Amino acid sequence: MWSYQHPGFTVHQLPALRDNYIYLIEADSNNTLIAVDPAEAVSVHQACRHMGKPLTHIFNTHHHWDHTDGNLSLKKDFGCLIVGAEGDAARIPGIDITVTEASPPALAGLDISVLDVPGHTNGHIAYIINDALFCGDTLFGAGCGRLFEGTAAQMWNSLNKIAELDGNTKIYCAHEYTLANLAYASAIDANNPALTARIVADKNRRKQDQPTIPSSIDMEKATNPFLRPLDSYFCRNYAAAHNISSEPLSIFSDIRSRKDRW
Ligand SMILES: [Zn+2]
């Protein structure tokens, strides 16, 4: 378990299943303890025991089983409240509180906002608390989620919302996919020195069994191939090399569909 201090709360990062991360958000000022996307219950139980605190809430970003499988067991044992997207209420096990961008969860001591970020699934949301973003399977280290339900245009719009956050915002995504994503990134953005430096740094982290997550908005804008279409110079070069329109959505769509075939 790794822990990161933010103003007013601490984020604890638990590895789960093969390559998932579950996050525990521990408020400084009260007993609020939130599990984000509990892929399973056992590691959350262990962490709660270790901290000597019961779980008070579960925040789900979307309905996939590897984000919600711990819901019912944790609710049964802790009586915690389950929070998820209004649009996904029918698919989130045990949901108690539905939220949207316009009606985020209200919890004492934490200033929480919600972004609607459809693309990976239709009801996908992200939670922002101060300088921490919990974005599930929307944005990954050097990658983005597959388009299981939404369109490329929806995902591009969702990624743009995320890219507008402060550059220092920490990105707590739900999977450790970074090295595989970086291999793809270097195939399409080979002349990017920031990307080359990131590959060295993140390979070293993994060699030492350290996570590459959290990342940051600035790091993703500089190196993530799915955010690089925000850079007009990158778009011009990519469009010329692949003989497509230099419009950012066209570039994003092309990079996303190539990844599916890669
Ligand atoms: Zn998913």
Image: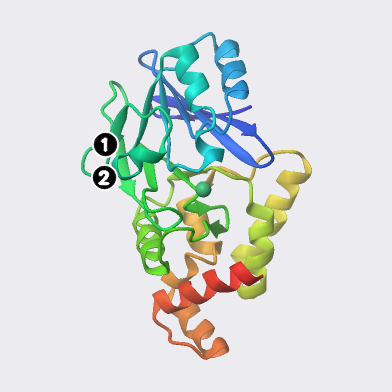
Outermost residue, front side = 90
Task: Give how far across and how far down residue 65 sits, in percent.
Answer: 53, 39
The way the protein has been coloured in the rendering is: rainbow
Are there few (<14), some (14-19), or many (20+) residues within 10 Å of tag 1?
A: many
Quadrant holding the C terminus: bottom right
Quadrant holding the N terminus: top right
Instruction: Check disc 1 and report its element: helix, strand or loop.
Output: loop
Task: Give how far across and how far down residue 91 sits, in percent.
Answer: 40, 40
Q: Do callouts 2 and 1 mark residues in contact (Cβ within 8 Å)?
A: yes
The answer to which of 54 and 191 lies nearer the viewer is: 54
Task: Give how far across and how far down residue 181 sits, in percent.
Answer: 63, 59
Q: In the displayed structure, would residue 246 be above or below residue 166?
A: below
Q: In the image, 244: left or right of 195? A: left
Distance (Cα) linking label 2 and label 1: 6 Å
Kindly identify which numbered label has been placed on residue 169. Answer: none
Q: In the displayed structure, would residue 85 be above or below residue 189?
A: above
Residue 134, quarter of picture: top left
Residue at image location 70% in from the left, 39% down from the top: 210
Task: Give how far across and how far down residue 140 sits, in percent.
Answer: 54, 52
Residue at image location 52% in from the left, 59% down from the top: 146
The answer to which of 250 and 17 lies nearer the viewer is: 17
Residue 27, quarter of picture: top left
Kindly identify which numbered label has been placed on residue 104. Answer: 1
Q: Would you name the residue on which mark 2 appears?
A: 101
Q: Confirm whether residue 111 shows in the render.
A: no
Amino acid carrying label 2: it is: Glu
Q: In the image, 136: left or right of 32? A: right
Q: Confirm whether residue 175 shows in the render.
A: yes
Instruction: Check disc 2 and report its element: helix, strand or loop.
Output: loop
